[in-house]
Amino acid sequence: MSPWNERYTVYTNAAGEYARRVFYVAGRRPGFFSRFFAFLVLFAFIGIAMVVLIPFMVLGAGVLGFLWLRSAVRELIGRAHEPDGLFDRRRNVRVIRRDRTD
């Protein structure tokens, strides 16, 4: 029997079941290398996620920028072809025609 098991049995027999569970859980906690490996795996997953997600985010921002620019240009071209040009969006404006003599 290992020294840890001998101490575990001696200490917990006198203290009861709760102390036995506490010693059992404390004895099962991960060591330094297990925690270090877990952090390495976690950071590897985060790194892979960033390598995959960041290009998609940049691509999405580029697509949204292109769509916004395209709609702005189409709106300018559309207004240029309308009869009143750039002023076509003005509503409720009284137009005074200087060439008519009524």
Image: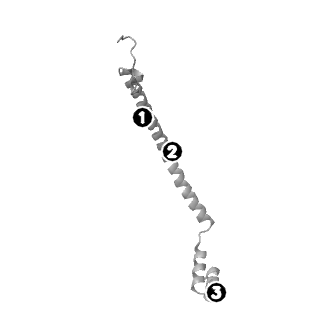
Reply above or below: 38 against 21.
Answer: above
Residue lying at the far front of the rendered structure: 102
Relative image position of residue 39 (x, y in whole percent): 58, 59
The foreground one among 64 and 102 is 102
Front: mark 2 or 3: 2
What is the basis of the colouring in this image? Answer: one colour
Relative image position of residue 95 (x, y in whole percent): 39, 20
Relative image position of residue 9 (x, y in whole percent): 61, 85
Reply above or below: 57 against 7.
Answer: above
Other-residue count near label 1 (Cα within 10 Å), few / some / many at <14 / 14–19 / ≥20? few
Q: How far apart are marks 2 and 1 (CA)?
A: 20 Å
> Is residue 49 left or right of 5 when viewed as pictured?
left
Front: mark 2 or 1: 1
Q: Is mark 1 on a helix, strand or loop?
A: helix
User: Which of the 4 image quadrants contains residue 11?
Assistant: bottom right
Looking at the rendered structure, the kind of residue marked 3 is Val
Q: Which mark is residue 10?
A: 3
Q: Is mark 3 on a helix, strand or loop?
A: helix
Other-residue count near label 3 (Cα within 10 Å), few / some / many at <14 / 14–19 / ≥20? few
| Quadrant of the rendering where the C terminus is positioned | top left
| Residue that numbered label 1 is attached to | 67
How many numbered discs?
3
Q: Which residue is drawn at 39% across and 24% down?
A: 88
> Is residue 57 left or right of 34 when viewed as pictured?
left
| Residue that numbered label 2 is attached to | 54
Looking at the rendered structure, the kind of residue marked 1 is Leu
Residues under numbered marks 2 and 3 in contact, where contact means CB atoms less than 8 Å apart: no
User: Which of the 4 image quadrants contains residue 69?
Assistant: top left
Reply above or below: 94 against 34.
Answer: above
Relative image position of residue 60 (x, y in whole percent): 45, 41
Looking at the rendered structure, the kind of residue marked 2 is Ile
The foreground one among 97 and 63 is 97
